[in-house]
Amino acid sequence: MKTFDPDFLKKLERLALHGSRLVQGGTGGNRRSKAKGSSIEFSDFREYSLGDDYRSIDWNAYARFERLFIKLYMEEREANVTVFLDCSASMGEGKPVKGVLAKKLAAVFAYIALSSYDRVGIAAINDKVSGQLPYFSGKQGFSRVLAFLDALPFEGRTSLNKSIASFNSLRGRRGISIVLSDFLAEDGYLEAFKYLKYQQQDVIAIPILSPEELDPPLSGTLRLLDAEDREGRPVEVEITPNTLSLYKKALHEYFSSLKNACMNMEIPCIQVSSAVSMDELIFEKLHHAGVIR
Amino acid sequence: MSFQNPWGLSALLLLIPLILLYILKKQYEDRVISSTLLWQQVSRELQAAKPWQRLRTRLMLILQISALILFALSLARPAYSAEGESIYYVVVLDTSARMQASDVKPSRMEAAVNALMDFIDGLKARDTMTIVLAGHRPFVLAGPSGVKSELKRHVRQVEPVSGSSDLYSAVQLARTLLQDQGEGAGQIHVFSDHSLSDSVQGNTVFHTFTGNGQNAAVAHLSYELRDGSLTVLSRIANYGDDRDLTLEMKVDGVLQNVKQISLPAGEEANVYWTDLVPDSTAEIEVSILEEDDLMLDNTGIIVINQEYHGKVLLTTERNLFLERAVSLRKDMELFKANPGEILESSDFHLYIYDGYMPENLPENGHIIAFAPPSHEEIGLVVEEEILPEGIKISFQSQYSDLLQYIEPEGYRIAKAGKMNLPEGFTALITDNEGNPLLAAGEREGRKTALFSFSLHDSNLPLKPDFPILIQNLLSWMLPPEMTFPGPVYAGETVPLTPFPDVSHITVTSPAGKKYRFDAYPVPVFYDTRDIGVYEIVQHAENRTYEGRFAVSVPTDEVSDLRSDSPDSDTAAREEAAAAALPFQKDIWMIAGWILLLLLLLEWQVYHHGI
């Protein structure tokens, strides 16, 4: 499967055109430091703009120039951005396939991060870390990202808790972790979030569901087989309006629970459909959610 | 409650697959989805709600079964009478000869009777029934009665007639009976082999029993007597497919001739039987030997009436009274001649001489003479002329019948001849001195009546007794024969006109059954159900009059068994059935609305679990 078609790459180029402004604006928000630069190497000044942390304002400069400047630090600019990409078999399902959107999003985040001089690493996970792209920086290496993502298969069972906990490359360095998954894991997701928080990560959760999962086009009497465990215990169910209603209720409760958990842990959670267009996703959903500015 | 379309209930058979669908194990279709995580939760919730689910399933099953039952009921078009209201049935049973056809097994009649028996069995407790038989004339066989055994007993005794039936009159009678019954529920049911299109109205239901029978018939028989030879014409009709027929002809029960003919479908053929000897022939029977669906009309019988010899010669100069009195007998041919005139033909059966007698009497023939001269051949001697005084009648003689209804008081006779009667003659009327004025006698088969006076010398012709007296004499000498107008068909009535002196009449049917009727009032013979020759004997005091007539099948009306005959109007029959039961309220619409309501409820349960 060719994940990245020419249209997609063209959109990335367009991102690049607007990317610098966004990235510059974003450094102060997403990667602010609680240590206030005491042990961080000073890098540069930048004029204050709306949304910047006023704690970073250089009041001395204000006294001299009567203009607001904020201080930029090298460490912030070089924060680690880690993309956890769910590559379990369930992500290979759906029309459009959920995993394709996940890969594209991973590429987008990697591109944005590289554009803002961050270090990017990608971890393909199912019930373990099935593949990893080591951290690197520089936009010129973006092709490695594409090659890596394109080669990832969707297989195995989902276990966010196990797989993320087994990812050892964070090493307590502050950074940003983006989790791209359907979050439909039997052992849940809380342990994974806690682990990432423990590793001083700003976590972004993006649950991706296919249209079939949001509104199942099922009918009749079915034996439902799990794509991740076809030999496992199937669910025998007669599809009736009542059954579908129960499913939607369960879906709503499950993802409400996810969002509540994310809210409690200050994790932005943006649920998307695999059928959503990249433009809508990036420029509306992620932008409105404050993930990208 | 009754059903206008009971076949609609066959939709109840759909209950079987419906219940099987619920009983049979569900066949699951495998479907791969990305994750069953949420579906497992749904399954757990469904399991938790299983008791309710079962109840819901049962509820849906019950609703669907109820809907199906209502659907079948709607198709069956249920109707009900008001509660407690009884239905008055008037049943018309056709008994025409056509009902004997065996194209419906065992016969149309038996099939109709069996159906009527079943119909009677289906009567409810308060229902009543009157049975009208449609024969040649309709009449009420039984009822009104609600006793099934009584009704069935009457029906069992019904036998088909050999003639046609007046079904229309029977249905009209049934309608009258129904109207007389007054307000309330009532129906007319007609059991026949055809329906009546013009009676398709109101509450009349036709139950028809008809096949497409093959039949050939002897449609007509007639004869001609001419110049001493007898020729019989038989017309053979084929109401079925093309066929070859073998005909046999019997004379007085003895086989005389056999012929074979080929008749195309629907055609008729005239077959002549010639060279028959008329004098010895009393009846002729023509039969079709091949069997068909109606054997009754395969034989035709005709009675040969010998040519009647009622020729009378009146020899008189002029006697209008006598001429008119004689001519009252329509079955006689009156010839007139002047005294002395010699006629070529001497073949008369009665000679009336008025004041004249030939010297040589004819060889045969009876004689009535007025004021005859002495005659050697008769042995009559007429002496001097007398002037009769008073009138006396002798009722003691063997010829007293000749004076029946005669009251001679007031007779005046100016003059008469004094007759010395020959041997064997009896004076019936005399004057006071015993001189015979009217005498009668019979010698060597010749009957003779002698009036000693001329009618011109008497007031007798002015009396009302005169024509009666002349008729009495004529009847004695030339007894009238019984005639019957045209062919007599089975079921028709035959008037038995008695002769004046007859006291009673007996009729013997072909089956040997005897019927006795008083002569007056004039009887009518009605039991002509048997095909064949009936013998009639009119009994007078001293003599009898005999006659015969044949009863045949009205083939024009009963022999055509084909179901496409005009009366078998299927459409009309169906319309009649549809127009039936006007006293019942059709409630299929109610069942239909309830069905719709149930379907809505079932939809609600299916979609919303309520």
Image (cartoon, coloured by chain):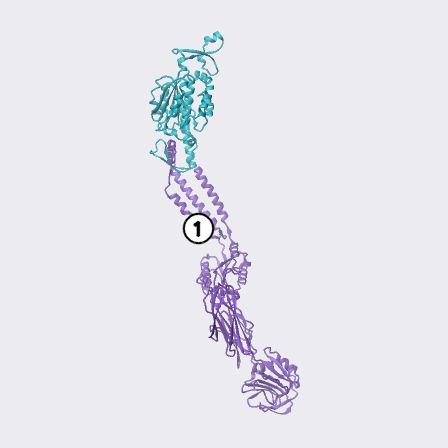
Chain colours: A cyan, B purple
Residue found at the very far bottom of the displayed protein: B383
Q: Secondary structure at mark 1?
A: helix
Q: Nearer the viewer, residue B133 or A85?
A: A85
Q: Mark 1 packing: few (<14 Cα in 10 Å), some, or many (20+)? A: few
Q: Position of residue B20 (x, y in %)?
A: 39, 45
Mark 1 falls within which chain?
A: B
Is residue A35 at least partly visible in the picture? Answer: yes
| Relative to A84, B591 lies left or right | right
Quarter assignment of residue A101:
top left
Q: Position of residue A49 (x, y in %)?
A: 48, 15
Q: Nearer the viewer, residue A120 or A147?
A: A147
Residue to which mark 1 is pinned: B10
> In this picture, is B158 found above or below B548?
above
| Relative to A83, B337 lies left or right | right
Quarter assignment of residue A209:
top left
Q: Nearer the viewer, residue B480 or B388?
A: B480
Residue found at the very far top of the displayed protein: A64
Amino acid type assigned to the residue bearing label 1 in the image: Ser
> In this picture, is B565 found above or below A87?
below
Q: Nearer the viewer, residue A151 or A41?
A: A151
Q: Position of residue A118 (x, y in %)?
A: 40, 17
Q: Position of residue A194 (x, y in %)?
A: 36, 22
> In this picture, is B445 found above or below A110?
below
Is residue A265 at least partly visible in the picture? Answer: no
